Amino acid sequence: MRYDLDQLETFLTVLELGSVTTAAARLNLSKSVVSKRVTDLEGELGAALFRRNAGRIVPTEAAHQLAEGLRPALAEVRAAAEAVACGGDQVLRGSLSLSAPASFGTLYLSAFLADFALANPGIVLRVEYDDTFVDLARGGYDLGVRIGTLDDSSLMVRKLCEDQSVPCAAPALLGRRGRPDSPQALAGWPVIGYSRMSNVTLWRFRQGARWVHPDVVEAAAVNNGEAMRDLAIAGVGLAMLPGFIAEPAIRAGRLERILPEATTRAMPINAVWPPVRPMPAKLRALIDALSAHFAAGAPWKQG
């Protein structure tokens, strides 16, 4: 068999994006070049990687099987090549792909990433902010930022800082209904739900050795923390927000923390990445820079 890295990387890009047109735009190639690379690879392998139907492409089982083996192998090839390339002049080169939650990314990563890009002009950053769960390996990401308990034990982890869920409400709403004095007193209160998490999980408080789940009433539900904050500020209901969203609004007087003595969910914020040996110098540089950026702790807690 004869195939090259361009064919393999083009195939993975098409698989990740699900479209020849989108892959061509990312790779800065024409659609005909992308299609030919994939077709040539299929010819060399003697297997169909995509089914084409009415302009749509659907990956075959062979495509998924090939991708599972290719991703770690190509990552190691890139790491080895970049280690040699960077060894002479110490200039970091290549691309880095990062996935992070939407609100946290726009509020606390964008400025940092801009500084990192300016300090490392040889690196091209690809950044995706999305609150949905992203499989880093399947999505072709070098690094992710995750908030909360980690479920994927296969990832490498470096803790950046710690956050805490903050129950809060508009002062006007509390003025009308009073201020609850215990988690149980929240029963029947209207709340802003987070559509990616049940209220039983979201609204819980530690009391001794057990968790208490007040029987709240969902008045609205959205899939973004800043949208939850804005609904809470408007007085639609209580909100259980990440500290990084709640704290600035509380300092500004737009929200008020309720039950300040209650213990809520701790939310570690971690940098995670698929294991790769050797680790590319560019990836190590980004992780080290992230760690240094948060070394003083959560910036939203520092005013």
Image: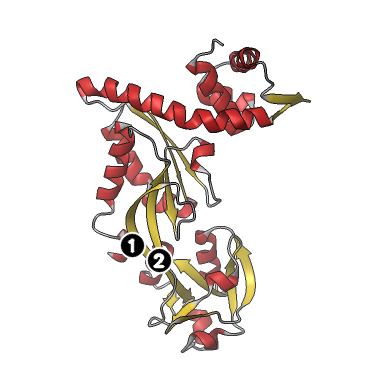
- Quarter of image, res 300: bottom left
| SS of the residue under disc 2 | helix
Residue 45 % position (x, y): 62, 16
- Quarter of image, res 55: top right
Is the Cβ of the residue at disc 1 closer than 8 Å to that at disc 2? yes
Q: Residue at point 56% right, 11% down?
A: 1
Between 24 and 42, the one lying in front of the other is 42
Q: How is the image coloured?
A: secondary structure
Query: Can the viewer see residue 91 in this picture?
Result: yes
Residue 302 % position (x, y): 27, 64
In the rendered image, the vertical position of residue 55 relative to residue 271, given as above or below: above
Q: Which residue is mark 1?
A: 300
Q: Which residue is mark 2?
A: 243
Q: Residue at point 67% right, 31% down?
A: 61
Tell me the kind of residue under disc 2: Gly
Q: Residue at point 51% right, 28% down?
A: 70
Tell me the kind of residue under disc 1: Trp
Between 93 and 112, the one lying in front of the other is 93
Residue, far top? 2
In the rendered image, the vertical position of residue 119 relative to residue 36, given as above or below: below
Residue 138 % position (x, y): 54, 38
| SS of the residue under disc 1 | helix
Residue, far front? 1
Residue 253 % position (x, y): 40, 73
